[in-house]
Structures are given as structure tokens and as C-alpha cells.
Amino acid sequence: MTQRTERVDELLRQEIGEILEREVADPRIGFVTVTDVETTPDLRHARVWVSVIAPQAEREATLAALGRAMSFVRRELGSRVRLKRIPELSVRLDDTAQRGTRVLRLLHELEEGRTPEEVPPSDESLPTPIARLPHEGDSPTEEVRPWEQEGTPGPHLRGGSPRGPRSCKRTAAERRSRPRRSRGPR
């Protein structure tokens, strides 16, 4: 993604959010937040990611109403934004907030030692984690490398490097990152 498309995405996100908040008077559009806009490099199409705070049935109705309102939003963008081409807008539901809340709740339950009892909604793709009980043979401490033990020199102090034996060869990335020396005029 180029800097130009990133700037256009951010501008469109702000303007679409403002238009939905102030200009669109559809009662089916409740609490909607435009979380992101992704435009194609040629600026012909844009995905508008929205977060809706409502039950599942109301979310679907809100998305349908937003889909119908996008032609009005596009026309308003044409008068507000100076772009050669205003992209076709398609609305997508951004459910990362709900999924993140669910993951945090499940982690909290696992930390407390409880097994998560809630069955996830059928449309959710996250599996419900199951608490792992300690098994015989599990190490009580983490594995310690020999050079991490106190008093043992690391590989870089024993004549080697963390990458392996000492070598004069540089990696391609190291060669590219160093500036070339000037040899003077030719």
C-alpha cells in the first residue's frame, strides 16, 4: 500500500463517518462507527469497514440500510473531497471488537481456573479454548540454553557469533545497508 492510498483511505474514513453521523437520517442506522476504509490502488472500489453496536438481527438490518445509503454517501463525497474518481463503496462488518471481547473473557475465565461454559455463536469462527492440565513429565521451569546459565560465556564470546562460526562473509542485507565508499573521480 502506498502512502497516497493510505492518506486517501484515512480521508475517506473521516468523511464517510461524518456524513453518516450528520447527513444520513435513516432510523435503521443506529450506532455505527467507520473503523477502516480500504481502497484499491486505482481508486475504483473501496471497502468500508463498520462496527455496529447492536444485536445480530439489528446489525444485519443496519448493514442493509448502509448498503442502500452508500450511493448518497458517494455523491456527498464528490462534493466534499477533491479526487479524480470517487470509488464505489461496499460496506463490510468489522466484528473485531466483539471477537476481542470474547477472547479476553475466555482468557480471564481460564486464568481463574474455570472451564469456559459458554457455547460460541454459530457464526463465529474462533474455537473455544480448553484448559490444559499439567501432565506427568512436564518441566516445571523453562529450558535454559547453556550460555544463559550464570558464568557461562555466550557463543559470541567464545569465538563465534549467535548466527554461527565466525566468518568474513556478510549477508546481502548487511551489504545493502552499508554505504559505498567513494573511490574518487574516474
Image (cartoon, rainbow, N blue to C red):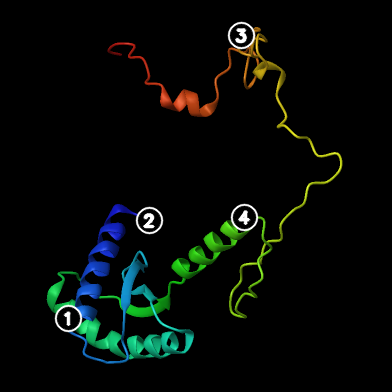
Disc 4 or 2, which lies upstream in sequence?
2
The residue tagged 4 is: 112
In terms of image quadrants, where is residue 88?
bottom left
The CA distance from mark 3 to mark 4 is 44 Å
In terms of image quadrants, where is residue 13?
bottom left
Q: Which mark is residue 1?
A: 2
- SS for tag 4? loop
Identified at 27% across, 57% down, the residue is: 4
The CA distance from mark 3 to mark 1 is 65 Å
The kind of residue tagged 4 is Glu
The residue tagged 3 is: 157
The kind of residue tagged 3 is Leu
Disc 1 or 4, which lies upstream in sequence?
1
Identified at 58% across, 12% down, the residue is: 168
The kind of residue tagged 1 is Arg
Do tag 3 and tag 4 residues touch (Cβ < 8 Å)? no
Q: Is residue 85 visible?
A: no
